[in-house]
Amino acid sequence: MAGTQDDKNALKESEWSLYMIKTRLNTLYTGISTDVERRFKEHSGASKRAARYLKGKGPLELVWQQSVGSKSDALILEYQVKKLNRRQKLSLIEGEIALASLLE
């Protein structure tokens, strides 16, 4: 059974997600992770692993996340989302535009 758990862990590690966090100042931060819940806790707490941009801007709110597949896909999509203006990011959060459309 230990092999089965290792297989599940390996599968989980390969499932990258893209996420957006809203700050107290109403700004949006975009990032990627294999464990969004853990990463959000790092950003929200006093962790040394928290993004420098988010320090002192709490409380933070996780407003959007989507599984995107491989790390390569996640990095490409993160770059595309970071190039969007605020209105476009809000449209993505509201589901008015699809993440896949960013790859076209």
Image: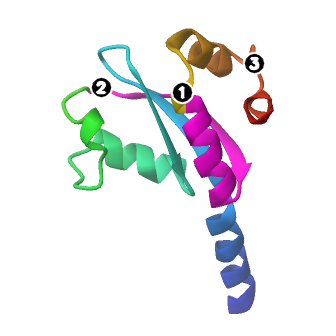
Q: Position of residue 102 (x, y in %)?
A: 73, 30
Residue type pointed to by label 2: Pro
Vertical placement of residue 70 versus 87, above or below = below
Q: Residue at x 30, y 25 (%)?
A: 59
Q: Label 3 is placed on what type of residue? A: Ile
Discs 1/3, front:
1
Q: Secondary structure at mark 1?
A: helix
Q: Is residue 24 rendered to the left or right of residue 5? A: left
The answer to whether residue 64 shows anywhere in this view is no
Residue 97 numbered mark, or none: 3
The residue tagged 2 is 59
Image quadrant assignment for residue 104? top right
Q: What's the colour scheme?
A: rainbow
In the image, the segment drawn in magenta is 58-81
Residue located beneath label 1 in the image: 83
Which dot, 3 or 2, sits closer to the camera?
A: 3
Q: Secondary structure at mark 3?
A: loop
Between discs 3 and 2, the one toward the N terminus: 2
Q: CA distance from mark 1 to mark 3?
A: 15 Å
Q: How many marks?
A: 3
Say which quadrant the N terminus sits in. Answer: bottom right
The residue shown at (68%, 90%) is 2
Is 69 one of the magenta-colored residues? yes
